[in-house]
Image: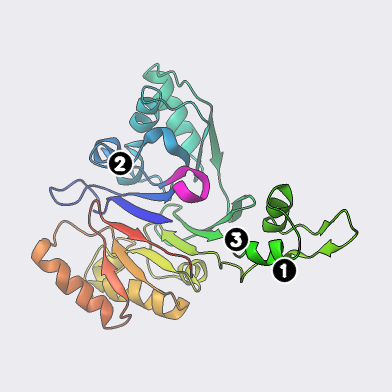
Amino acid sequence: MDIFFLGTGAGMPAKLRNVTSIALKLLEERGAIWLFDAGEATQHQILHTSIKPRRLEKIFITHLHGDHIYGLPGLLSSRSFQGGDSEVTVYGPKGIKEFLQVSLSVSQTYLKYPLTIIEIDEGVIFEDKQFTVEARLLDHGIPSYGYRVVEKDRPGTLLADKLMAAGVKPGPIFRKIKNGETVTLEDGRVIEPQDFLGPAQKGRVVTILGDTRFCENAILLAQDADLLIHEATFSRDEEKLAFDYFHSTTHQAAEVAKQAKCKQLCLTHISSRYDRNDWRELVKQAKEVFVHTDIAEDFMEVTLPYK
């Protein structure tokens, strides 16, 4: 599981930071990429990476401000010409369906793949055998959601030597045991999977928040997360400005991580008023509250190993 930052700026594109887009790379887990927000020029940012748009499976939009959605129609359109033929599902607040339908219709864009658009409410918005995604409303003037991505625990390593010592030959039985199934052998013996599997691999948790003031739902979504990605549009000393514009400061983002007992915090959505020389100070401010803090930059990648 890798998190790749395609855009980490706030409001409008800047030379050092494009507007918001974050790719959750699940290539090992499901051969897919999930995208969170698609600000203007997201597809241009992708051109400088190894990310393949045909791998896009799901796109989660936090809110409908332009710096989070203006790149979406172009990305969806270009995907048709880049070998993408599998279904893409877009999740977002009410209005995302109209935005995409009008954009694609007026531009007479034809997609060569199925596109599903789901306008979400709070709660679990997706679940399968591997992952659960929960959404909650934040505090941003317009509906803005945060997403909590929870990977379900994976079975432990198959103890193949122990199975063979018990007289079980490699093949379909191995696969069933690896999948957690109880198996009855031809001689009547019952093989319980827990006896032939190592400790389960604990699933990882990533929380990606949209723009927000400090709020309780941010803490709930981030509870015990391995990684919290939180906007920090303003510095510690600009708390009033952050409140007036429905954003957060470095200290407030760190306070969410602290209260939620996260493992790691990554600051993003950084205002263009801060140049490269200021970024170290922004991280220093956050570390005053939560030491395990880093600041995202465009094209930065964070890897989350299994626990």
Residue sitting farthest toward the left: 277
- Front position in the image: 217 or 79: 79
Residue 12's disc is: none
Q: Give the Cα distance between marks 1 and 2.
A: 39 Å
Pointer 2: what residue? 50
Instruction: Please provide percent x and percent y for residue 113.
Output: 50, 24
Magenta extent = 27-34
Q: Which mark is residue 194?
A: 1
Q: Please name whichever residue, 249 or 21, is drawn nearer the observer in this view of the structure.
A: 21
Q: Report the side of 275 relative to 155 (left or right).
A: left
In the rendered structure, which amino acid carries the disc numbered 1? Answer: Gln
Would you place residue 254 above or below residue 145 in this image?
A: below
Q: Quadrant of residue 168?
A: bottom right
Q: Left or right: 204 with respect to 80?
A: right
As drawn, the label of residue 152 is 3
Q: How is the image coloured?
A: rainbow
Residue at 72%, 47% (x, y): give it: 172
Q: Distance between the residues labelled 3 and 2?
A: 27 Å
Q: Specify which label sits upstream in the sequence, 3 or 2.
A: 2
**Residue at disc 3, secondary structure:** loop
Please tell me whether residue 192 belongs to the stretch shown in magenta. no
Look at the image and tell me whether residue 159 can be seen. no
Q: Where is residue 274 in the image (x, y as percent from the top left)?
A: 14, 62
Label 1 vs label 3: CA separation? 17 Å
Q: Nearer the viewer, mark 1 or mark 2?
A: 1
Question: Which residue is at a point 32% across and 37% down the rendered structure image?
Answer: 70
